[in-house]
């Protein structure tokens, strides 16, 4: 195991085959301790030799200073700085380090098959564990749906607007299949003790097969509910306020005509059924205050 930067580790595969690599990350938000505990457990197994990876691995603990203080971030949201211009502060420096590490990893492997960025939600969710995929440059393939379902994820959210997230960067620049995995609520134990997730990660690290091939021929069924982002809620002024309870659980259903928020003179009422996700009015002006989802029709 090689240390490439603070809390960034390269683990080569023992075989000398030219295999595709995977990236596993957590702690992009330093207070999401559950996913950090999961990957610490993985790091320990890799370090003491009880776990032997079958293909190259880049293991990333995203924001060490925020992790030490158990804060979401120090200066700014790290997950908005991968490709952002004119950013400054601790997180901006860290984003540059992680981009450099990913580029170095790409130079050491045949390709990068997969990036899983583990997170946990601040609020509870009606669908406890779910995945988000960044905007896809070539459409949304469905080959990985069964694998995510097997790992215990109940929904997949398809994003429709590019943002400077870690997963969008690894998809756009490294051609990885990239997923943000919301592994449960902020309670550390609820995530760290999720054995289904743990065994799935071990299977990924221990296999030289790609995510899309991790299902058997007789296990093609996916139980994922699928959503697509219908509206991104941006806080455009200090007058922004939600017109509903922003503490409601993620995936709360709202009927057509429901008033969602008001900002200066603008008031949004939805024109079809929607499901709310990540509502948070306390973000900075110009930042995303939440998402409104609709069911994805294939």
Image (cartoon, helix red, strand yellow):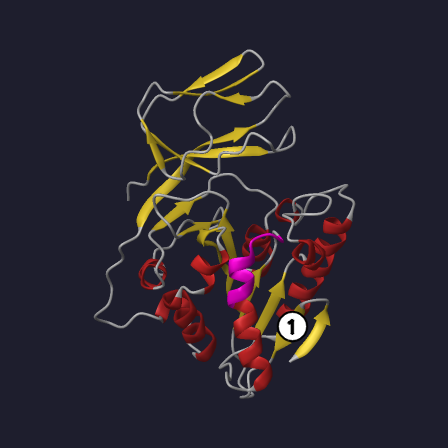
* Residue for point 31% across, 70% down: 215
**Does any portion of residue 131 appear in the rendered image?**
yes
The residue that mark 1 highlights is: 9
| Relative vertical location of residue 261 with respect to residue 184 in this rendering, above or below | above
Magenta span? 30-38
Rendered location of residue 76, percent (x, y): 70, 43
Give the image quarter of residue 33: bottom right
| Quadrant of the image containing the N terminus | bottom right
Rendered location of residue 256, percent (x, y): 31, 22
Rendered location of residue 141, percent (x, y): 38, 55
- Prevailing secondary structure class for the magenta stretch in the rendered image: helix
Category of crowding for the residue at label 1, using alpha-carbon neighbours closer than 10 angstroms: few (below 14), some (14–19), many (at least 20): some
Give the image quarter of residue 112: bottom right
* Residue for point 34% across, 43% down: 126
| Element under disc 1 | strand
So how many labels did they put on this image? 1
Rendered location of residue 269, percent (x, y): 41, 18
The stretch drawn in magenta includes residue 33: yes
**Does any portion of residue 176 appear in the rendered image?**
no
Q: Nearer the viewer, residue 80 or 191?
A: 191
| Relative vertical location of residue 212 with respect to residue 273 in this rendering, above or below | below
| Relative vertical location of residue 200 with respect to residue 19 in this rendering, above or below | above
Q: Nearer the viewer, residue 178 or 172?
A: 178
Which residue in the rendered view is the most extreme toward the left? 218
Q: Is residue 202 left or right of residue 271?
A: right
| Relative vertical location of residue 9 with respect to residue 289 in this rendering, above or below | below
| Quadrant of the image containing the C terminus | top left
Q: Is residue 167 left or right of residue 81?
A: left
The stretch drawn in magenta includes residue 168: no
């Amino acid at each position: 195991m090689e240390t490439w930067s603070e809390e960034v580790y390269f683990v080569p595969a023992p075989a000398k085959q030219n295999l595709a690599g995977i990236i596993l990350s957590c702690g992009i938000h330093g207070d999401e301790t559950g996913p950090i505990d999961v990957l610490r457990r993985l790091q320990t197994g890799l370090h003491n030799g009880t776990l032997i990876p079958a293909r190259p691995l880049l293991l990333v603990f995203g924001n060490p200073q925020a992790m030490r203080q158990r804060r979401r971030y120090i200066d700014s949201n790290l997950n908005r700085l991968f490709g952002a211009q004119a950013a400054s502060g601790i997180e901006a420096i860290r984003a540059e380090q992680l981009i450099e590490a990913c580029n170095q990893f790409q130079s050491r492997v045949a390709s990068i098959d997969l990036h899983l960025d583990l997170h946990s939600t601040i609020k509870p969710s009606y669908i406890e564990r779910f995945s988000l995929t960044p905007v896809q440059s070539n459409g949304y393939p469905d080959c990985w749906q069964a694998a995510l379902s097997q790992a215990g994820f109940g929904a997949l959210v398809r994003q429709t607007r590019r943002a400077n997230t870690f997963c969008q960067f690894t998809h756009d620049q490294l051609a990885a299949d990239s997923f943000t995995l919301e592994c449960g609520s902020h309670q550390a134990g609820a995530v760290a003790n999720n054995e289904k997730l743990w065994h799935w990660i071990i299977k990924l690290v221990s296999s030289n097969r790609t995510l899309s091939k991790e299902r058997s021929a007789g296990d093609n069924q996916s139980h994922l509910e699928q959503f697509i982002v219908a509206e991104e809620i941006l806080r455009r002024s200090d007058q922004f306020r939600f017109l509903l309870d922003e503490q409601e659980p993620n995936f709360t259903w709202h009927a057509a005509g429901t008033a969602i928020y008001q900002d200066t003179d603008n008031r949004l009422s939805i024109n079809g059924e929607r499901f709310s996700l990540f509502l948070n009015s306390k973000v900075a002006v110009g930042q995303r205050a939440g998402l409104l989802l609709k069911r994805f029709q294939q």
